[in-house]
Amino acid sequence: MANAFELEDLTKKFGSVVALDKVTLAIPERRVVGLIGRNGSGKTTLMHHVVGLQLPTHGRCTTLGEPAATLGSEQLAEIGVVWQESRFLDWMTVERHIRYVASFYRRWDREREQRLLHELELETNKRVGTLTPGNAQKLGLILAVCHHPRLLLLDEPMSALDPISRRQVLAFLLELLHEDEVTTVISSHVLRDIEEIVEWIVCLDRGRVSVDCSLDSLQERYSEWVVTSARPLARSFEEPWILEQRTNNHKAHLMVRDAEDRIESFEGKYEVQVHSQPLNLERIFPLLHHRRNP
Amino acid sequence: MRAAAAVMWQRSGAPLYRLLWRPATLAWIPTAAICAFIPMVFVLSIRLAFGLPELELSAGRAIQVLTLVAMMGLLVGQIVRELQHCPWSWAVPSLRRRLLPGVVLLGVLTALFARETWVLLAIPFEIGSRNAARDLYRFWNDFPPLSTGVFALYFLAFTAAVRPVPATIAGLLTGVFLADELTRAAAAHQAVAMLAAAVLVPVLLYHTLGASAARRRPFLPTRLLSGPVTTAARAPAPLRAGGGAQWKLAQLGAEPLDWLRAGVFENHGYRTSFVRVGTVAIAAAGLGYVALQTLLGAFLGATALWSGIYANAGRNIPDAIMSLTIVSALVTVPLAVFLTGFGSISLTRAPFYPLSRGQLAKIEFWGSLAEATVVTGLMAALLTAFWTSVYNEVWGYVAFGSTVWERLTGSSTAWVPALTRPLALVFLIAPIVQLFRLRYLRAAAPRNRIVVFIAVVALTAALTFAGLIAMGWANVLAPRYSLIVDVPVFAALAIVSQLLYRRGVERYFATADLI
């Protein structure tokens, strides 16, 4: 399978600040990736590199088979982006702005546009400058998907949406992924949402890729143990694979990594009963940034 | 220690802190210096050269001093609106009351400064019949509080201006055409003037600082947020929609003019762009005309001085330097370079176009060239109007015994080279300033923009003077053939400059971060 984009040993510095540090990453086509990381970890900078808005200090980035720095109209017309901070032409109405942007693309799906406008309840006669942040994000989404992109980059696309709109957007994205099989990278801090649509997780930590694996394997690696015992438990369990623990007399909650095959030995060693349960992405995320046992 | 002092300074409630604790305020200093310097050069040079005080007391003085006040008012008004439009200021209690002392203090300081500038430039005189100039002079001297109040009122009017461009034009036109009469009327009817001021000042203050007026659209994205430099660089978007021309992907790169149209459409909308361009052209022409008259007088005065100084040494040099070309170029070149350098045809940086870096470079270059052409055309019209209208007027100077004018012109068609050389210089210098803007201002953090802006001013001045000196020496070295040589040389240099600019733009877009 060809790669939608590849980053090879890519470093980006802003003065003395290293935004991306020797990032090597390859995203195959049709993969749906969740790009996660703390504030300032380099997620937006990475997306800027993918579309060629920023250029690496070292290393290289290839998008849709072309170096990102020399992407032409043909390649760019196959990319859709929703940026975290939408920048539009404030004086235009929503309708006029859509028509204006649509005119730059060879194909533009009016049906999809009208459906999205209707479902997202976006008023077309309003000036873009008067839109609320949430409605501006809806407009950004419409502009990003109606030309049927091959690569869709969504940088915090739902941060300003209300819960109902968020559900609508998620439903649409699921439909889009099914219809177009578009390679999608979605960055969000609302991990519960992206968990529903992504299959692959890339986690950035201070400019470095700390996780690059499928969501399933991530959920297999990390789990929560509920430890119970008839006797009072030790205040803490000293095991290197225990990332966090909370003990309460006869019961303890342990966050563990790569420990599925250790349950029996643990039960024997501490004379306890262990019940292992999976974690969702929201709960795994802090563990990915665990400093004590990196 | 410094931090503690800063906190104490903030907590003291010092009114100026809130207004002036920002880099943009630095713009106040060069603006004041330029506005004060120009009339001083004019008056002092004429006074020293001719000793004719009646030349210096006229409506022209009022225009220059009022322009100074207007610039100060606009600057403070923009800072006030920046504070009012910031989302965080919505919750600040008593914002109006807290800003008031700073505005009033700056208004008083500016008015006093303007009045002192006026008094410094004026001297008593006895000759001549009753005229506006004498009335004006007596007014400023006999009624300091009232005259200071007039300046303060003018300051407040510009501080209160919501849209800088129309306010600037209205104020300047008032200054150009009516300041003399208005001020004379104020002197003659002081009671009425004071009553009018008593009504106008609170009204203007309310509209300057009024929370309801400023906050009517609190979430309106304002171009003022980054201060006056950004305002100069980016024209405010009009509220009216433009026409509906369409562009297609197939046209990208093939038709640069389409992208120029797109740039105009984006930044102005078609319907309003003509109005905007027209008003800016009128303002530029008005400013240019006044500045040309001022500089012409200054150079005529300086000519007599320098001719004496250099009577026995290098007589050709002052002749060359003091050519009409220089007088024209000193006004038109910086004005044109600034209008070109901070134009707004280029596309927005909003990244929703499928435009390659190469195409962005092409659009930037052709946009710049189009702006340079339009602006140069405006300057050509201005120069033509100026030289044809003032030619006879300027002959008046010769009546005072100077042969300067004859030596300067040689013939009645001397304004033709005076027109063509500066325009060539615009095409030569503008690309350098445009490239400087592209490389540094575009990417600069808001905090650094004022530094870049000042650097652009300095660069423009340096390049203009360098070009003028080159022209002067060309005249010295080959006075008879300078015209024949100048045209092809400047044309070649302008082409080389444009080609280098194109190369620079392409290199910039190939290697720079675009966001």
Image (cartoon, rainbow, N blue to C red):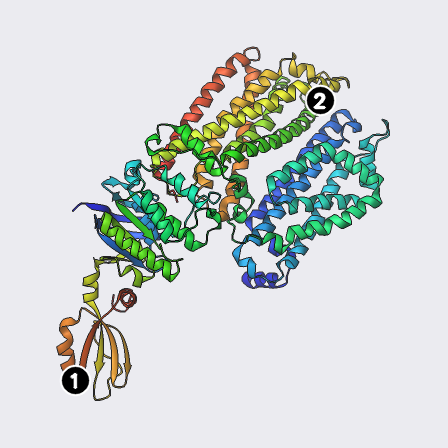
Residue at the image point whose x is 68% and y is 34% from the top: B173
The answer to which quarter of the image holds residue A205 is bottom left
Q: Position of residue A74 (x, y in %)?
A: 28, 36
Residue bearing mark 1: A271
Residue B224 location in percent, x, y? Answer: 54, 47
The structure residue drawn at horizontal position 74% and vertical position 20%, both measured from the top left corner, is B397
Mark 2 lies on a secondary structure that is helix
Q: Nearer the viewer, residue B462 or B167?
A: B167
The residues tagged by marks 1 and 2 sit, at their Cα atoms, a distance apart of 108 Å
Q: Is residue A81 visible?
A: yes
The N terminus of chain B - image quarter: bottom right
Above or below residue A97? Residue B363 is above
Tell which of A208 and A225 is nearer to you.
A225
In this rendering, would B99 be left or right of A226? right
Q: Is residue A122 above or below residue B452?
A: below
**In the rendered view, does A100 fall on the left or right side of B372?**
left
